[in-house]
Amino acid sequence: MNKKQVLQENREYIIEEYKNGKDTVWLGKKFGVSNAYIYLFLRDECKIKMRVVQKFYSVKDKIMELYEGGAKSYNQIAKQIGVSNTTCMKYCKKLGIDFSHNDCQREVTLVSQLDEIVKDYESGMGCTKLSKKYDASEASINMFLRRHGIEAKYLKQYDIPHTFFDNIDCEEKAYVLGFFAADGCQTKNNRFQVSVTDEQILRDIYSVMKYDGPVGIRESYKDNWKEQYYFSIGSVYMCKRLTELGCPKRKSMILDMPKDEDLP
C-alpha cells in the first residue's frame, strides 16, 4: 500500500485530528510522511481550508483575554485563535501561561478578581506575591495589570556577580569556568547563557556564584528531546572577562582553554 492509499484509508481520522488542533507535523509523523505531504493531501484531496499561521504579536492579546476569561487548556485557546495546539503552547509559554498542571486550571478567573488584584497591587504587593496569591505566573499578572491600564513595576532584579571571574582562586570557580566553556554561550546583547538537562548542576553553580536568579525551563516538543534547564545573565563586564579567559562569542570553533596562570 503506497503513501496516498494509506492516507485515503485514514482520511476521516486525519481530517478530524486536524480540525481538533493537531498540526501537519504531528500527522506526518503519525503516518510516516512529510508534513508537506499531509498539507497537500488535506488541501487538495480533502478540500480542507488550511489554518493560516498567526504571528505571535497579532494574537498575544487575544490569548491573554481568553486565559483571563477562564480558558482551561491549550486546545481551547488554539481553536479560538486558529493555530495548532503546538503553536498555541509555544505562544502561551512566551506569556507565562502553563496548562500542564491541574493547579494552573483555576476555577476563579483573574478578571473576576480585578478589584482585589488592583487593591493589593496599589497597597504595595508586587507581581511575585500576587502571582502566588492568585495562582498565576508573574508574566500573566504583569500583562493583566497592563491590559487594565496599570503599568506594573518591573519584575524582581537579581544581584549579578559581575566580578565572579576576576580571580579564579579556587577549584569551584575553575569548575564553573570550565562548565561555562563547555556548555555556555555569549549572545550579541552581552548576555551569557547556560542550558543543561540536570537542574541540580545549575543550582550548584548558583550556590558557588551566590546568585539568586531564576532557573528557566524549556520543555521538549519532540519525543527524543529532554527538558532543558537554563539561566541567562546580562553583564557586559562578565562577558568581557569571559572573553579574556578564552570564552568569546561563537566560541565553538575558536575556544581557547584558560591559561595556567588564570587557574588556581
Image (cartoon, rainbow, N blue to C red):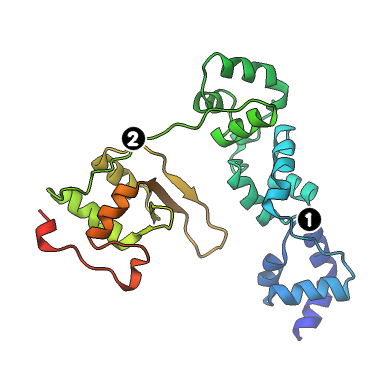
- According to the image, label 1 marks what residue? 20
Q: Is residue 69 above or below residue 114?
A: below
Q: Is residue 104 above or below residue 38?
A: above
Lateral position of residue 174 relative to residue 3, left or right: left
C-alpha distance separating marks 2 and 1: 46 Å
Mark 1, residues whose alpha carbon is within 10 Å: few (<14), some, or many (≥20)?
some
Estimate the x, y position of residue 39 in percent, counting from the top left.
Answer: 77, 72
Estimate the x, y position of residue 23 in percent, counting from the top left.
Answer: 72, 62
Closer-to-camera residue (263/77): 263
Q: In this view, does 108 lie above or below 222?
A: above
Rendered residue at 73%/47% (across/down): 59
Estimate the x, y position of residue 89 in percent, counting from the top left.
Answer: 64, 50
Mark 2, residues whose alpha carbon is within 10 Å: few (<14), some, or many (≥20)?
few
Residue type, numbered disc 2: Asp
Label 2 or label 1, whichever lies nearer to me, is: 2
**Location of residue 180 (image quadrant):** bottom left
Rendered residue at 41%/57% (across/down): 187
**Location of residue 114 (image quadrant):** top right
Lateral position of residue 55 relative to residue 222, left or right: right
Residue type, numbered disc 1: Asn
Is residue 95 in view from this perspective?
yes
Q: Which mark is residue 42?
A: none
- According to the image, label 2 marks what residue? 159
Closer-to-camera residue (188/260): 188
Along the polypeptide, which appears first: circle 2 or circle 1? 1
Residue projecting furthest to the bottom: 2
Lateral position of residue 122 relative to residue 35, left or right: left
Q: Quadrant of the N terminus?
A: bottom right
- Number of marks in the image? 2
Secondary structure type for disc 2: loop
